[in-house]
Image (tube, rainbow, N blue to C red):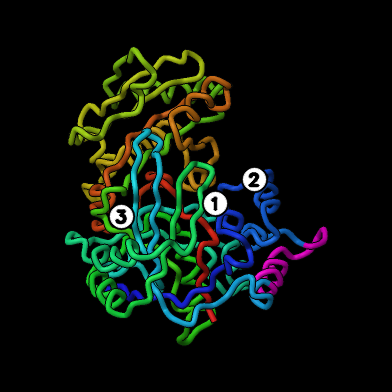
Amino acid sequence: MAEILPLTALHYDLARVGSLQDVVAPPYDVIDDEGRRALAARSPYNVVRVDLPQPAEPGGDPYAEAARTFRRWQEDGIVTRDEQPAIWVLEQTYRGPDGRELRRRGFLGRVRVTDYGPGRIRPHERTHPGPKEDRLRLTRATRANLSPIFSLFSDPGHVAWQALAPHVREQPPFGEATDDDGTVHRLWRVTEPQAIATVLAAVAPAELLIADGHHRYETARVYADEVGGEGPHRYVLMCLVPLEDPGLTVFPTHRLLTGLADDPARQEALAAAIRAAFEVEPLEDPRQLVPDRDDGDDAVRLGYMDARLLRPYRLTLKDQAIADAALAEHAPPYRRLDTAVLEALILEGALGMTDEQIDHRAGLDYARDFDQALEALRTGAADAAFFMGATPVKRVQEVAEAGETMPPKSTYFFPKLLTGMLFNPLQ
């Protein structure tokens, strides 16, 4: 069983900084240089100054600068530490990439860092290797978790939310912020012991499935073992959302192929692989490219378009046996994933990509929404695109329970969690 505890948090003193709006930031890995400058300009205390640090002088150590900044904020009372442990309720009201207006609810606490395993914590995706060392250096410097990991647990009776709901209804939120996607993030602090006990009891028997933040969890594991012994460093900041929450949705991440335009041999290998494994159906409207997963049909379907002809096609796997043979070493739920079938038959099989090339995006890129993928084709930034369907949450759970990890970027859990709403001290 995973061990979950309330959080004695570090957080901004809103009387000093004005509001969460000015000091929070998106996840570090979606912030470019211009975005960082804009966030830093909002406030001298915006968390981007610590989470995506820059050295004070050219050639300096950005992590040392992050440590100095974060320590100074605490010494000056900009960031304060609670005296009471609490469960923090997070409500996110958002419009998804599909246009629907939804509300997702979860709560933040501390989770003991353990090895992955049944009944404890499972990953659901393979991770890219790059960011782990950066996040480890930042954790060593700040001795805190700056961003929460996003995980899922099963609570079919909605016991946790029923314990927290009265506290949400009876008091205004601790803080609120609206991100650039228009998502409204609201945060409540719940310190009442009985409510906390009920929430912890509801989660205690559950297995946790990491939805987003695999790098941060693996970094937390390495850091905990580096420090050794027992203490706060054995826990990591986590936001837990019930699998049964009606606002929990998963969106697809589309695949973009590059480097094909001047390589006729690879173009033909790609075309031959598509013809061999898939039924190819022309579509009247490019908007039909994204497969619909709501009908319960298990058939593997992909949308396909190349930059030369810009004609949309639907690809349907001719026989599940083709995927079963190509992925024979994997469990049945994995073999039905469109991302896994595409990786095995096209990326690795036809185009000869290695796992290392896929992990480092050599000849491969990603688009989080349909318009972005289409624009990449129209501008020539991509030579071809495969349009993926959304993976149902149940399928994500089945793959994880089978002990498998999905290919990178198989899921897009939206909205993201902001950095800077809460911090978890590790000492």
Q: Where is residue 386 shown, x and y percent of the image?
A: 41, 29
- State if disc 3 and disc 1 touch (CB < 8 Å): no
Please report contact status of discs 2 and 1: CB closer than 8 Å, yes or no. yes
Q: Residue furthest bottom?
A: 229
- Indicate the secondary structure of the residue bearing disc 1: loop
Q: Are marks 2 and 3 in contact (CB under 8 Å)?
A: no
**Distance in Å between CA atoms under marks 2 and 1:** 10 Å
Residue 45: x and y in percent read 66, 62
Judged left or right of residue 381, residue 273 is left
The stretch drawn in magenta includes residue 65: yes
Q: Residues within 10 Å of mark 1 (few under 14, many from 20)?
A: many
Discs 2/3, front: 2
In this rendering, the answer to whether 275 lies above or below 150 is above
Please identify the quadrant where the N terminus is shown: bottom left
Amino acid type at image mark 3: Glu
Residue for point 35% across, 28% down? 290
Q: Identify residue for label 1.
A: 26
Q: Which residues are magenta?
A: 56-72
Secondary structure found at label 3:
loop
Residue 131, above or below 326: below
Residue where numbered disc 2 is placed: 35
Q: Residue at left 31%, top 64%?
A: 208
The quarter of the displayed image where residue 94 is located: top left
Q: Mark 3 — residue? A: 404
The part of the image, by quadrant, that contains residue 60 is: bottom right
Type of residue at label 2?
Gly
How many numbered discs sit on the rendered protein?
A: 3
